[in-house]
Image (cartoon, coloured by chain):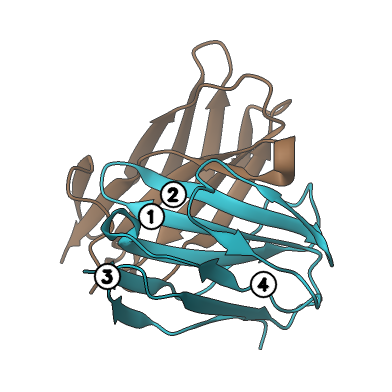
Chain colours: A cyan, B brown
Amino acid sequence: EAQVTQNPRYLITVTGKKLTVTCSQNMNHEYMSWYRQDPGLGLRQIYYSMNVEVTDKGDVPEGYKVSRKEKRNFPLILESPSPNQTSLYFCASTAGLMNTEAFFGQGTRLTVV
Amino acid sequence: GESVGLHLPTLSVQEGDNSIINCAYSNSASDYFIWYKQESGKGPQFIIDIRSNMDKRQGQRVTVLLNKTVKHLSLQIAATQPGDSAVYFCAENAYQGGKLIFGQGTELSVKP
């Protein structure tokens, strides 16, 4: 089954404690991205990757890092989480840059206290 | 389930009726316009897209209309079912970074 898998689904952490949200896709997609979803603001892109070792900033990259060492994995790293990063996070993958059908993971609900 | 928006426009329809969800977009340079559906507790799911040089496209029970003159996009759902209850997002495919630019979303509620 084609899918994007994120872990964990829920996470509560304290300010400043480094965390990683993992994302893996089994469709051999080249393009992956991370979004955050906040009430009233919709979905906003954090970072994206067009292929292995190629990453770039989206609209709201501050406070986040990513890496793309393998095609299937695209982890999101929060080196020093802050309460304003409390949000619902989604990883997505598409077959290519021009594809409109993005496959989203189930989401990670992060709370930073 | 997850709450994806506290101030979303809402649309309530009776089961079996047709639904029309509207969206205004801003970037005339977008090549594609897309509709996504997000059910409670899940990630967005692709429904249908339309290229900017088209006015209408039909799928299974859904029709998307594009009016470039007024920058308006609509999604029509025929014979709405309880399983159609979700938040619907319009999106634009911006070539810059290949990202999707999402609208705020509309919450569709189907009454049995």
Q: Marks 4/2: CA distance?
A: 18 Å
Left or right of A100, for residue A107: left
Give residue B81's position: percent from left, percent from top.
31, 65
| Residue ID for mark 4 | A74
Q: Quadrant of residue A65?
A: bottom right
| Residue ID for mark 3 | A111
In what element is the residue under mark 4?
loop
Q: Marks 3/2: CA distance?
A: 17 Å
The structure residue drawn at horizontal position 48% and vertical position 67%, both measured from the top left corner, is: A78
Task: Identify which residue, A57 or A102, lies in the foreground.
Answer: A57
Q: Marks 4/1: CA distance?
A: 18 Å
Judge the density around disc 2: few (<14), some (14-19), many (≥20) Cα neighbours within 10 Å.
many
Give residue B15's position: percent from left, percent from top.
23, 60
Q: Are marks 1 and 2 on the same chain?
A: yes
The structure residue drawn at horizontal position 72% and vertical position 36%, both measured from the top left corner, is: B96
Judge the density around disc 3: few (<14), some (14-19), many (≥20) Cα neighbours within 10 Å.
some
Disc nearer the start of the sequence (1/2): 1
Disc nearer the start of the sequence (4/1): 1
Disc nearer the start of the sequence (4/3): 4
Left or right of A113, for residue B50: right
Q: Marks 1/2: CA distance?
A: 4 Å
| Residue ID for mark 2 | A43
Depth check, mark 4 against mark 1: the one in front is 4
Disc nearer the start of the sequence (3/2): 2
Tell me the quarter of the image containing the N terminus of chain A.
Answer: bottom right
Disc 1 vs disc 2: Cβ atoms closer than 8 Å?
A: yes
Task: Identify which residue, A99 or A8, lies in the foreground.
Answer: A8
